[in-house]
Amino acid sequence: MAALDGSQEPYPVSGDDSTAIIDSLPDALLVLSENGTVMLMNRAAERMFGYQRGELVGQDHRIILAGGYRMGVRRLFRALLRDGPEYGYSSPFDAFGLRKDGTEFKGEVACALLDTAAGLCMSVSVRATQHRETPDDGLREAMSLLSATLESTADGILVVDTDGQIAGVNEQFVSMWGIPRDLLATHDDDAVIGFVLGLLEDPQGFLDKVLDLYAHPLAESNDILKFIDGRTFERYSRPQKVADKMVGRVWSFRDVTPRLTAQDQAKRAMADLAEQAAQLKALAFQDPLTGLANRKLFHDQLAEALRSDRAVSVDVLLLDLDDFKEVNDILGHHAGDEMLTEVARRLRSCVRPDDTVARLGGDEFVVLLTASPEPDAVAERIVASLNVPMWIDGTMLRPSLSLGLASVSQETVEGSELLRQADVAMYAAKAAGKNRYMRFEPDMMTALVQRTDMEAGLRTAVENSEIFVHYQPVISPALGEVVQFEALARWKQDGEMVPPAQFIPTAERSGLISSVGMQVMRHSFTELKPWLAADATRSVAVNVSGVQLKDCRFADTVLRLAASCSTDPRQLVLEVTESVFFDPDAHVISQLSVLRDAGVRVALDDFGTGYSSLGRLQELPVDAVKIDRSFVSMVRTGAEKLPILNSMINMAHSLGLTVTAEGIETGPQASYLTNLNCDSLQGYLFSHPEPESGLELALLRSADAIDELRGVRLEG
Ligand code: C2E
Ligand code: MG
Ligand code: MG
């Protein structure tokens, strides 16, 4: 190499005039080393390219080649080397040169191998041919277009010759792969490949593909390259042919990272959307308070269950909490919500995971059992499970429920029919005393029809003033006489007495209760008139339903009726149950206030049976309490200790209320309550309720009973 550095006698020709001869050649002559470095150039070359010798010698020869022609000379060099030194020359070919001033010119190039002391070189002669007008200008233009196209494409292009050497790359390739300029300038293909492999997740896969394509030179391929830094390239490769001869392979690379990222994002967005849709769908079928299925889902599931195998049993358990309205009214809606949530939890724990438990609304729930071996046992379990006390806001509550059970049979094929049967059975459970389950029986339908008949009958009875009254005496043990009559509504349908427990709820539901109540009051004022007139301390007690109190004219109507019948309002006691005090409707309390101001007294009926505690008694605008029969019935021999009765009476007395005990049937009960200082007693022991015509009899029987009691007490 030292001999070729241009500083000494460089020409590898013999003879003294060789330098002068070479310099005098009209054609440009250059000698290139194997790696393409200009080793020597003559004067004509200086003139042709516009470079001084010192500027070009030692540089890569490609700076004097126009774009599109830069790889050609090296490729030729390798071809000549392959053919061997003895045949080492090329035919002349056209190329475009690039002058120092940037202008291009057309030249004819011929190359030959040159064996020097420093190794094999290549001599290149160039003859400017611009003077020749050739049709190849079109080709030159095409080359220029191609070159511009290659540089402007967004894809990275790499051309490799048949020996696996890099024949060319575009700018995009270099920047996409981030190949350092200086590394590229070394033309050390192995180093470039090493750099490229270092970027990839699977360098071996990359190499395998390359080797595979060399084994199949005509094959095309398309695959994906994953980068360690997260990028993804699409790799496309096809053979490069010139006139059907394979001269290399073109690789094109496209950075598809943004596209894949966008696809990923779109996929994720779709997944999010699907999840949200699923959540919305779940919400559409869920009861928001309890998380149970809602009415819609229940109906869907029921329809589904009835559609499938007819051999499989389907049972519907419809249930309704007893007196739930009172929980809401007395303890507030928050407590009501908590109770419903707890009930939902208990219901779920009574059934199998696949069974449907739904809340239909309010305090109404439904359970759907499919292929259950023991629907009655489930119903029993539910009733028992709900009876276990629960604590809500510091108050112990014992929820109870009425449950109707209906099962699919040959006759029932419709879901709506099954639900109706369960509803009828539930109604029967309520009528039978609540806190129980009942299985649907066909004759319950008859009962339903009867109820409907009852309403129609009652309406007619009210219109025809057929409601009449029985009076039950209330006695004062201290005075030993009857001090009050309780007026109890009576109605006969088709000659049969209908118990108030049946027709009063019907009257309340239908709104007929106001008329019933007024008819009872009118009868009482007129029929008891002589008895009341005889002693101003005597009174009549009339039951009033909460529905009546909602009417803001109620107080006025009562007082006007009393006035028209010449009854002193102070001789009237109105019996209400505690639930009327928790009606959010402000009318109710104001009606009672007006009446109390006029001298009417208010008694709290059935005391002790509601959700209200003893402690709340002081808040209620009442003058008297009537202890419910269920407490009185706890007295059997009279020897038992019943602190609850004691507490009730003491509490009421301490609040200045008088106390009546209802349902006194036995002497021991009468004595027991008298000993607890109960102010008055009422019950069959003294007299059953009697019509007006039986008032004398009722008074006589009561007197007898009082005498008997006194005798017992005297004897005792
Ligand atoms: P209540 O106001 O608690 O009336 C007492 C009920 O207990 C009456 O039943 C009475 O006959 C019954 N009874 C009295 N002493 C005894 C006894 O020693 N043993 C037993 N086992 N029972 C006894 P009745 O007449 O069937 O009335 C039932 C309920 O119907 C009444 O309970 C009341 O809540 C309602 N009711 C009756 N008449 C009217 C009315 O005119 N208006 C309204 N709103 N409700 C009424
Ligand atoms: Mg009563
Ligand atoms: Mg009562």
Image (cartoon, rainbow, N blue to C red):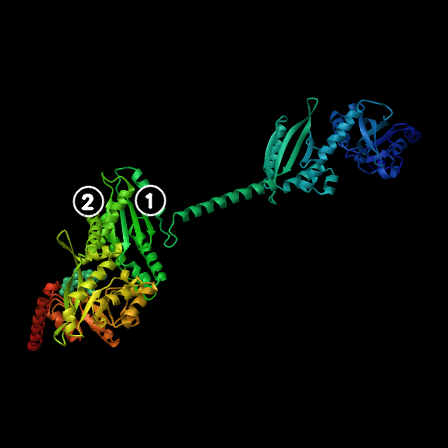
Does the Cβ of the disc 2 residue fall within 8 Å of ligand 1? no
Q: Residue at x 51, y 43 (%)?
A: 270
Q: Quadrant of residue 174?
A: top right
Give amino acid for label 2: Pro
Q: Image quadrant of ligand 2?
A: bottom left
State which quarter of the image contains the N terminus: top right
Give above or below for 111 relative to 445.
Answer: above
User: Who is closer to the viewer here, 370 or 514?
Assistant: 514
User: Who is closer to the viewer here, 658 or 165?
Assistant: 658
Q: Which residue is mark 1?
A: 299
1 or 2: tag closer to the N-terminus: 1
How crowded is the residue under tag 1: few (<14 C-alpha within 10 Å), some, or many (20+)? some
For residue 583, say whether it is visible. yes
Q: Residue 481, image x and y in percent? A: 12, 73
User: Who is closer to the viewer here, 528 or 74?
Assistant: 528
For residue 605, say whether it is visible. no
Q: Residue 399, image x and y in percent? A: 28, 59
Residue 375 shown left or right of residue 92 in the figure = left
Q: Which residue is mark 2?
A: 442
Q: Are marks 1 and 2 in contact (CB under 8 Å)?
A: no
Q: Residue 381, image x and y in percent? A: 25, 53
User: Who is closer to the viewer here, 462 or 622?
Assistant: 462
Q: Which secondary structure lies at badge 2?
A: helix
State which quarter of the image contains the C terminus: bottom left
State the CA–CA distance, disc 1 to disc 2: 23 Å
Give amino acid for label 1: His
Residue 496 badge: none
Q: Which secondary structure lies at badge 1?
A: helix
